[in-house]
Image (cartoon, coloured by chain):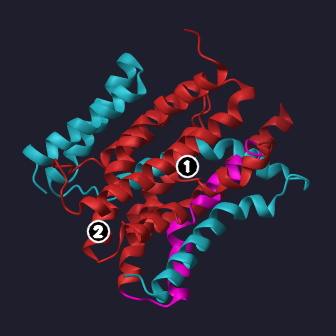
Amino acid sequence: MRMSIKEKVLKTAFIDTLPILVAFLILGMGFGVLMSNAGYSPFFVFLMSAFIYAGSMQFVAVSLIAAKVMPITALLMTFLVNARHIFYGLSLLERYQYTGKLKPYLIFGLTDETYSLVCNPSHVTNENKTAYYFLVTLLNHLYWIAGGLIGSVLGNVIPFNSKGIEFSMTALFTVIFLEQWRDTKDHAPVLVGIVSTVAARIVFGPDHFLIAAMILIAVSLLLLLHRRKGEDHFA
Amino acid sequence: MPDTHDLILVAVIAAGTAVTRFLPFLLFPPGRKKPRWLLRLSNVLPSAVIAMLIVYCLKDVYFSKTQGFLPELISLAVVFLLHLWKRQSLLSIVGGTICYMVLIQHFFNH
């Protein structure tokens, strides 16, 4: 049976998001369990997963809500934890320019995992890219909500020892890294990314290095581009 | 049960998250001409950011004991080798993750 183009895009999006399905169900369940232990209903878990939709921030939010912090504290914490999203938007300005009515939803749903797929859509033709972006964003969003609800309803009844499952995210990013490495001859930006982040991690420790890493990456890349522009000039 | 304060916090966190995602698009709407440096930067950012995310995932690695880095190192090697061998993303990801889970659950107790 021949598949229509829409079915093909859906199939591609589904296959690409499979690792995220597994990880989001399990991480989402972890979040749901945490919330249910703190005494919150599945509906509240749904609200958070549907409208905040930011994995690491939601885990931070559990403790912020439990501690009943002031709204301004929660807001500043949110900016700190999520500042990396600004990078995603900057690099997708062109790609998301002609996505029409779907654009606000695509931007709203821009998690790390969704970004990692949309910034590297190798097997989709140009006309179908918007549909692909939308389906990847929507599927990931649904996986995350489903995980939270399951965890929140089932409480602590997790059928197997899921310790270490979080490595699936590391593996996903590593695979995308390898694909990008294969697709380009220009490896300098990747090396800038690694060196800057490792340096920031060493200097600032595991909990406060991401913003420093981002500033270092942006400055180094701009210097690199500036130097190259100079070289082009003389060529 | 969530009280009003809980709901306000969720609304604030949701709004703050949305701001971080929408900000670049609000600063540079389609009509406005983007500076050349920004266009060049946006071409090289994705690969640097993926590298950043990998390091971010490995932020809790430490080198004073073998269990602090060896499970991660072995599992990353598995992802690399599987991917260079078959180039099937799902296989590389699932293989590396199972390897990591087995290692930290049975061989390296944190």
Q: Main secondary structure of the magenta part?
A: helix
Pick the quarter of the image with the C terminus of chain A. Answer: top right
The tint chain A carries is: red
Q: Confirm whether the magenta stretch covers residue A91.
A: yes
Asked if the residue at tag 1 contacts the one at tag 2, i.e. Cβ–Cβ closer than 8 Å, the answer is no
Of all chains in the rendering, the one displayed in cyan is B
Image spot of residue B101 (x, y percent):
20, 43
Residue appearing at x 78%, y 38% in the figure: A231
Q: Is residue A10 left or right of residue B90?
A: right
Quadrant location of residue A100? top right
Image spot of residue A192 (x, y percent):
55, 47
The residue under label 1 is B49
Circle 2 Cα neighbour tier, 10 Å, few/some/many (<14 / 14–19 / ≥20): many
Instruction: Give, as a single range, the part of the protein colored magenta.
Output: A67-96
Residue type (three-letter) at the residue carrying disc 1: Val
- Secondary element at image label 1: helix
Q: Is residue B31 left or right of residue B65?
A: right
Q: Which mark is residue A34?
A: 2
Q: Confirm whether the magenta stretch covers residue A32.
A: no
